Image: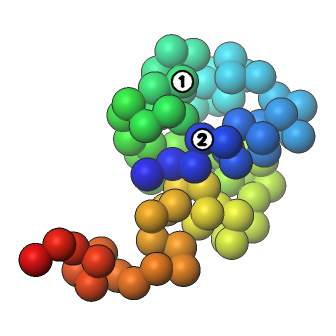
Amino acid sequence: MTDSVLLTSKISECGFTYSEIAHELGITRQGLWKKIHNRSEFKQSEIEKITRLLNLDMEVNSKIFFKNFVGNKSPKETAEP
């Protein structure tokens, strides 16, 4: 699950618009919005491009794109019985 607030904040801090990021990813602005707001998932290649564009370190990258797993147990350990 994507941390929408943190990603939106990082996009703004770097001076990018959704349209610019979408263009770099080769998707529509609406497609980017859906990914940011967890209506669809980012591809690995898109995560890599955003990480480079926004100059994200690994810690911030993990917080944004792997929100449910950072600082938590593995997915198997957190699954309901």
Residue drawn at (68%, 72%), measured in percent from left and top?
59
| Closer-to-camera residue (67/13) | 67
Secondary structure found at label 1 = helix
Residue drawn at (77%, 22%), measured in percent from left and top?
17
Residue highlighted by disc 2: 4
Indicate whether 40 appears above or below 28: below
Residue type at numbered disc 1: Trp
Residue highlighted by disc 1: 33
Q: Are marks 1 and 2 in contact (CB under 8 Å)?
A: no
Residue drawn at (52%, 43%), measured in percent from left and top?
46
Q: Neighbour class for label 1 at 10 Å: few (<14), some, many (≥20)? A: some
Residue drawn at (45%, 64%), measured in percent from left and top?
68
Is residue 26 at least partly visible in the picture? no
Q: Quadrant of residue 21?
A: top right
Is residue 68 at least partly visible in the picture? yes
Q: Neighbour class for label 2 at 10 Å: few (<14), some, many (≥20)? A: some
